[in-house]
Image: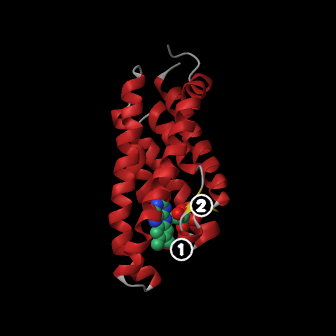
Amino acid sequence: MGDSMTNTKKVAIVGVFSALAFVVMYLELPIFPAVNFLKYDPSDIMALLIAFIYSPMLGVLVLVIKDILFYLFKSGDIIGIAMNFVAGALFIVPAAMIYSKKGRVREILGYLAGIAVATGGMALLNIVVVPFYWKVSLETVFALLPWIIGFNAIKFSIDSVVNYIIHRRVKKILEPNEE
Ligand code: RBF
């Protein structure tokens, strides 16, 4: 296949995965009642698949597109969408950068790094954002911190396990002529 054809196909696949990510975002599953503003959805898996199969940058593009669509069609909550985007980017960029196409050890180290960066980064960001968003005291935020940390650790662990199981099969379907 020529380069221009490959690019056309890549653009189409990124578009389809962004649309899929947007649709599955409607799941919005609150895991912990104490922090019901934190909602699980599997949309970051679509971005991680694209980041693994093509590049971290295209993975981030999937995050941008699905979050803009979700903001426009569903949420209207710019803070929630921004937090969702930052969390997703903090997870997929380290994971995909450390992942090497051959080694399972590097892949798992990538997931662990992504989970650690996203969970740590979002804990700090929530300490800053939640007092303004909910008009609560810092003490209240610190009381919620174990739930916030638990939410992000669980969310990105689920995404890692699912991605680990499916990404090679998805790559074979999308790029049957490679390797
Ligand atoms: N999403 C995360 O994945 N991790 C977070 O730490 C996180 N913190 C949030 C904090 C606030 C105040 C809000 C409003 C949303 C946050 N979100 C976070 C996004 C939330 O889980 C959900 O994806 C969006 O609100 C869209 O439904």
* Towards the viewer: 150 or 76: 150
Residue 31 bears which disc, if any? Answer: 2
Which residue does the image show at 50% across and 21% down from the upper left?
2
Identified by mark 1, the residue type is Asp
> For mark 2, does the 10 Å Cα neighbourhood hold few (<14), some (14 to 19), or many (20 or more) residues?
some
Q: Secondary structure at mark 1?
A: loop
* Towards the viewer: 77 or 115: 115
Position of residue 85 relative to residue 138, above or below, is: above
Find out if the beta carbon at label 1 lies less than 8 Å from the nearest ligand 1 atom: yes
Structural distance between the alpha carbons of marks 1 and 2: 20 Å
- Say how the picture is coloured: secondary structure
Say whether disc 1 or disc 2 marks the residue closer to the N-terminus: 2
Position of residue 173 relative to residue 162, above or below, is: above
* Towards the viewer: 173 or 26: 26
Which residue does the image show at 41% across and 79% down from the upper left?
140
Residue 126 visible in the snapshot: yes
Identified by mark 2, the residue type is Ile
Q: Secondary structure at mark 2?
A: loop
> For mark 1, does the 10 Å Cα neighbourhood hold few (<14), some (14 to 19), or many (20 or more) residues?
few
Corner quadrant of residue 168: top right
Position of residue 101 relative to residue 50, above or below, is: above
Q: Where's residue 88, x and y in %? A: 45, 52
Q: Where's residue 169, x and y in %? A: 60, 25
Corner quadrant of residue 34: bottom right
For this view, does 51 lie left or right of residue 125?
Answer: right
Q: Where's residue 57, x and y in %? A: 39, 43
For this view, does 124 lie left or right of residue 88?
Answer: left
For this view, does 145 lie left or right of residue 18?
Answer: left
Q: Which residue is mark 1?
A: 77
Residue 100 visible in the snapshot: no
